[in-house]
Image: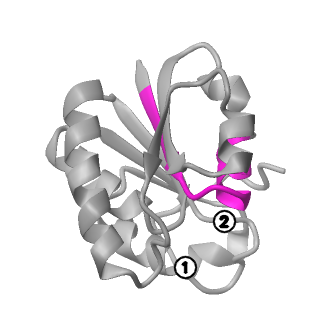
Amino acid sequence: MKVCLVGSSGGHLTHLYMLKPFWQNKDRFWVTFDKEDARSKLKSEKMYGCYYPTNRNLKNLIRNTFLAIKVLRKERPDVIISSGAAVAVPFFYIGKLMGAKTVYIEVFDRYDKPTITGKLVYPITDKFIVEWEEMKKVYPKAINLGSIF
């Protein structure tokens, strides 16, 4: 199984990194901001830098869409996993068109309202995971797996 882990640097990257027991023995690559924290945390990992800022930035959404086409065509992942933020959107939609399964993990600090990214990917995500039971009111098809932390 080949895994694509995609997300912003900082907390989103940390969230995905905490899934190490799942991804550590799999063929994988990362898509995140080319920033110091990401380079440090992923120094021995295959990483593609994406364009930022992403929130409410149409130019970088377009640039990241073309990046998603290029990277996903090259890597051909079986599954794409993200906990946000906006960089996940083009990777989920392009990945879905290419036959990849998608898993989205809504961030831990949201317990009663959706994130923008969560709302955008929810309709096409194969497995939508929340960390609070209250979030099932927001995302009825979600699976509550509890806290990753």
Residue 16: which numbered mark, if any? none
Residue 43 on image: x %, y %: 67, 27
Contact flag, marks 2 and 1 (Cβ < 8 Å):
yes
Q: Does the magenta stretch include residue 65?
A: no
Q: Secondary structure under badge 2?
A: loop
Residue 115: which numbered mark, if any? 1
Residue 124's place in the image compared with 48, above or below, is: below
Quadrant assignment, res 129:
bottom right
Residue 4's place in the image compared with 112, above or below, is: above
Instruction: Answer with mark 2 or mark 1, whichever residue precedes in sequence.
Output: 2
The answer for how far apart the CA atoms under marks 2 and 1 are is 8 Å
Residue 119 on image: x %, y %: 42, 77
Q: Does the magenta stretch include residue 12?
A: yes
Taking 100 as reference, is 107 left or right?
right
Closer to the camera in the image, 40 or 65: 40
Residue indicated by mark 2: 107
- Magenta segment range? 3-17
Q: Which residue lies furthest to the left in this view?
A: 97
Q: Which residue lies furthest to the top in this view?
A: 25
Residue 125's place in the image compared with 55, above or below, is: above
Quadrant assignment, res 133:
bottom right
Amino acid type assigned to the residue bearing label 1 in the image = Thr
Amino acid type assigned to the residue bearing label 2 in the image = Val
Could you tell me which residue is drawn at 72 percent across and 78 percent down?
111
Q: Which colour scheme is used?
A: one colour
